[in-house]
Image (tube, grey):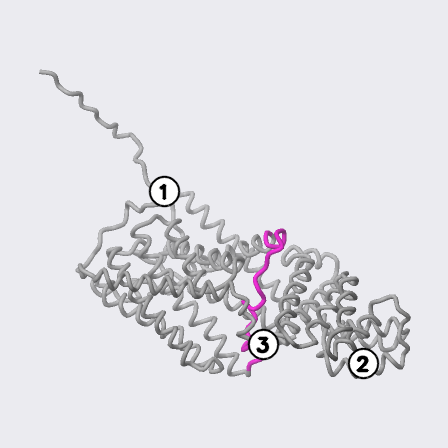
Amino acid sequence: MNESPVIASSPSSPVTRSWWRETEAPPAVGSFRQHYSATVSWLSALFLILSLAAVMAMASSALKLDRFDEPEQALSLMVGRTMDAEEGLRRAPAWEQRVMEWVSGDGVSERAQAIAWYQELAVRSEDPVVPLELAILQAESGQIPQALLSAHEWNHLAAPLPQYAEIVRAAYSEEPPPDRDAVEALQGRLADVLPVGWFYDRLMRRLAQRSGHIELASVLQDQSDRRADRLYAYSRRLTVVELVIMFIGSGCLVMIWRASRAGRNSIRLHDPGIPPPWPGRVGAAVLLRGGALGAIIMVMCLIYMPPENASLRALAIPLTNVPLLALAYYHLFRPAGMTFEEGFGLGLPWTSVGRLMTAVLAVVAAGLWGEWVMDRVAEQWQLASHWTEWFDEDLVWGTGSLTMVSLIEYVILAPLFEELVFRGLLFAILRRKFRFLPAALISAVIFGLAHGYGVVGLISVCWSGVLWAWIYEKTGSLGPGILAHAINNFLVCLAVMSLLRFG
């Protein structure tokens, strides 16, 4: 009788692991509900997809400007202050200029972006000051022929554009210069049209210099220099803070890497960590239902909540996330015998403060380095976030109480609830099915799409999402991600306020 050969696998043969599929998730612990309606799950998924599609459509639409009551004043303030800060940088010592240009870029791309934004606004706005400021910006950026061509076209349009055309030609063309009396008369007219700032100073200085009015040109130069130095001082202080965080955090990253090479996790804060001890299919059912309920509440808030009431608007963040968190507690945490503190790793002892701060500094530094790289790439490819994505009217023009509510929304509520949902639940549940990188990328992309930004903003948010997922994976606690998210949002708010509010 012939015996078929027996092929034995060598015990030393390497076990092939999938690069994307998680094969080592711990078994579920607890008694979980077994059956969920497939119809409800599919309807919830469809509603979530439609909600994300609507957010993406709004992000790619030209209607971004419509959310501002006064987009003309907003863009004028932002571009004028940015140009002033550039002037302040040029007055700094040479070594400081090199450091600041290394951190923030050389400013050339910023002018090109500002011109593009003004051209976009000029198409939609009926305010005649917009084309006037665009012509000043073009002329001061070396595009004098384009500015004069625009001024020539204004001769055939309604007042006051023909009068603005005369002023632009008097300032930038080779026509005979105006006399001192004419310039002094124009000064009063322009003060009624242009707000005091970069656009007004630049145009009046050109007129004063061409007319030989040295006293007026000197006064305008001093006024401009003081404002530029003040704005640059704010920018420099913020840059120093970011550089300190980057280099201290980089040291923390090196320490974490060296410990990892030695087989140790030096920043572990909580167990069991990731993947969580509940079934992935139950988690998916909870995510779909809770997410759909949250999207419905968000739609209701957009329809019925007055947008000018910042306190009610801030409440929208917890309101839209409470259904998902409640379902997660009832169907995931409680059956596993866990509280929220245990499930999210938030109950940390004081003895872990050192490891917590090391993790936070490391992930914030990694985020800043990533932003630096993205800025250089965007500069090279002439890409930029649209200015409407980061200009916040409450932070810039709001009353003290309104600004405080906005800061609470951005620095406390958004980091807390977004980390609980996108990392604590979405990423954690994906880790039952996928290995780290696919789970982090999927959750980060969904996180980015939910913000409704353009391409550059989406990539930036995705990078942050991956980092916060990584630190959750490494520490087993949402605490470092929440703090890092809060610091990131606070730095953004501080940058906006230092440039546009305090200056």
Query: What residue is pinned by disc 2?
Result: 187
Q: Is residue 480 magenta?
A: no
Q: Nearer the viewer, residue 2 or 60?
A: 60
Q: Secondary structure at mark 1?
A: loop
The quarter holding residue 51 reads bottom left
Q: Is residue 383 magenta?
A: yes
- Per the model, the C-alpha gap separating discs 3 and 1 is 47 Å
Number of the front mark, 2 or 3: 2
Q: Residue 43: x percent and y percent?
A: 29, 64
Q: Which mark identifies residue 19?
A: 1
Pointer 1: residues within 10 angstroms few (<14), some, or many (20+)? few
Q: Nearer the viewer, residue 330 or 147?
A: 147
Query: What residue is pinned by disc 3?
Result: 396
Q: Residue 153: x percent and y percent?
A: 76, 69
Q: Looking at the image, can residue 349 be seen?
A: no
Residues shaded magenta: 377-398
Q: Tell me if residue 84 comes above or below residue 243 in the rendering.
A: below
Q: Residue 411: x percent and y percent?
A: 47, 71
The three-letter amino acid code for the residue at tag 3 is: Val
Pointer 3: residues within 10 angstroms few (<14), some, or many (20+)? some
